Amino acid sequence: MIRLGIVIGSTRPGRRAPVVARWVAEAAGRHAAAGSGEASVGIIDIADHALPLLDEPVPAIRGDYRHPHTQAWAAAIDACDGFVFVTPEYNHSFPAALKNAVDFLYREWNDKAAGFVGYGALGAARAVEQLRPVLAEVKIATVRTQVLLSKYTDRALFTDPEAWSPSAEQEAALATMIGETVAWSRALRTVRAAAAA
């Protein structure tokens, strides 16, 4: 079974990410792979893991995790075949908490796929573009299609998140991105299996 993790990339109080992540998870649950039982979807909130600033004494590439919080985080990520990162944009980039969470691990990210949903004043395009090369370094293949939510087109998300409703265009882009992420996740499972053999 393909396990798709919706990663909430913000830990900030009052964040909009949980609302967006629920929308993504619901859309992923409607994908044909989920309907047939080939795929499952879960939300992974980095705030729930309470990761400190990177405190592992050994580089992540060695996989010698000493702390229980790292081991729990590694287990959550290792259980997934692909990801959708939900990220806001802070000062032209993605949140430090998300970078820190990525940096804690290495092998658990390898040869998996990822898509993006960004939100911010300008749709978080800059955050997503900066996140792509970071994920490439931990061997995550990112899909082209992305969903960007802006305060100019999605005002309610920023003023009354529970009342926000995405447009038909955003629903279509999200469905495309999820389809790409599921397909790449399926394909990369064979890469991981060959590497493990």
Image (cartoon, rainbow, N blue to C red):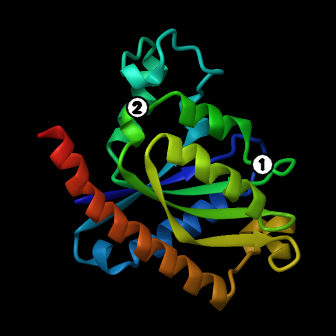
Please give the count of numbered marks on the rendered protein. 2
Residue 12 is drawn in which quadrant? top right
Q: Where is residue 3 in the image (x, y as percent from the top left)?
A: 32, 56
**Left or right: where 9 falls relative to 196:** right
Secondary-structure class at tag 1:
loop
User: What residue is disc 1 on?
Assistant: 93
The vertical placement of 158 against 196, above or below, is below
Q: Which of 59 and 120 is in front in this view?
A: 59
The vertical placement of 80 against 55, above or below, is below
Quadrant location, the C terminus: top left
Q: Where is residue 9 in the image (x, y as percent from the top left)?
A: 63, 47
Residue 11 is drawn in which quadrant? top right
Q: Where is residue 169 in the image (x, y as percent from the top left)?
A: 65, 88
The vertical placement of 154 against 189, above or below, is below
The vertical placement of 154 against 91, above or below, is below
Q: How far apart are marks 1 and 2 (CA)?
A: 24 Å
Residue drawn 35% across the image and 49% down it: 111
Q: Which of 74 and 103 is in front in this view?
A: 103
**Left or right: where 71 falls relative to 136:** left
Q: Nearer the viewer, residue 107 or 53?
A: 107
Question: Looking at the image, is mark 1 or mark 2 earlier in the sequence?
Answer: 2
Quadrant location, the N terminus: bottom left
Residue drawn 34% across the image and 71% down it: 183
Residue drawn 73% across the image and 54% down it: 127
Residue drawn 59% across the image and 44% down it: 134
Q: Which of marks 1 and 2 is in front?
A: 1
Secondary-structure class at tag 2:
helix
Question: Hey, what amino acid is under mark 2?
Answer: Ala
User: What residue is disc 2 on?
Assistant: 74
Q: Position of residue 160 (x, y in %)?
A: 82, 68
Question: Hey, what amino acid is under mark 1?
Answer: Ser
Q: Nearer the viewer, residue 136 or 23?
A: 136
